[in-house]
Amino acid sequence: MKRFEFSLDRLLRVKRQLERVAELEQQKAQDAVAQARAVLDGYRDQLLRVSDQFAACVGRAMTPHQWSSAAELAERLGRSIADQEQEVARAEARLLAAAQERAQVATEVEAISTLKRQQWDQWKQEAQKADQDRLDEVGLRQWMSALEEREAARDADSTEPPATEAVA
């Protein structure tokens, strides 16, 4: 019997490589989301510190320059936070796309792997059946040969004349 050969082996190898690439892309996207969130958290923390400074100055006199610079800083932080929230959303969208791509490739790899296992099982069953057929054939030949030998021995016994005893 010929050896097992899976016609889609090359495709399976390529798909497995694509799956590894997709895993790496998903990991990069997760890192980008984490980094974007860290920057956003930094901006929010900075805004919190500025608001605490404002709160501490309530009831005290501040120069117009102090007020304008603090207000300008708070406004810049507000814009930075809004921009960074959009960046987080874009990073999360890239992460979602990478996860979907990975899931798609993983599904394809699993489907091809399942097909390979099914074909392997079928090939193995056919090989076992062929081996059993060969064993049956050998057993049948041996049985037929033994039967022919017994019949030949029986025929030889029946064609010999009976032995006569000599009388003195």
Image (cartoon, rainbow, N blue to C red):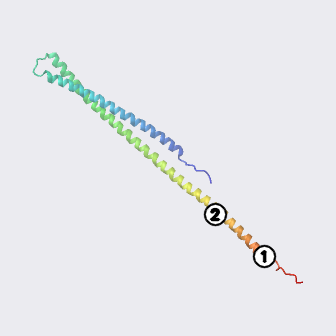
User: Which element type, helix, strand or loop, lies under badge 1?
Assistant: helix
Tell me which residue sits at (25%, 30%) in the image: 82
Find disc 2 in the rendering and name its residue. 136
Rendered-image quadrant of the C terminus: bottom right
Q: Position of residue 90 (x, y in %)?
A: 32, 34
Judge from the rendering whether residue 15 lies leftward or rightward of residue 59; answer left or right: right
The residue at the far left in this view is: 59
**Is 149 located above or below residue 17 in the figure?**
below
Which residue is at the front of the view, 113 or 138? 138
Judge from the rendering whether residue 142 lies leftward or rightward of residue 32; answer left or right: right
Q: Image quarter for residue 27?
A: top left
Tell me which residue sits at (58%, 57%) in the image: 128
* Mark found first going from the N terminus, 2 or 1: 2
Find disc 1 in the rendering and name its residue. 157
User: Which element type, helix, strand or loop, lies under badge 2?
Assistant: helix
How far separated are the C-alphas under marks 2 and 1? 31 Å
- Mark 2: few/some/many CA within 10 Å (<14, 14-19, 20+): few
- Mark 1: few/some/many CA within 10 Å (<14, 14-19, 20+): few
Q: Marks 1 and 2: in contact by CB < 8 Å?
A: no
Judge from the rendering whether residue 23 lies leftward or rightward of residue 50; answer left or right: right
Q: Image quarter for residue 40?
A: top left
Q: Position of residue 148 (x, y in %)?
A: 73, 70
Tell me which residue sits at (36%, 32%) in the image: 31
- The amino acid type of the residue labelled 1 equals Asp
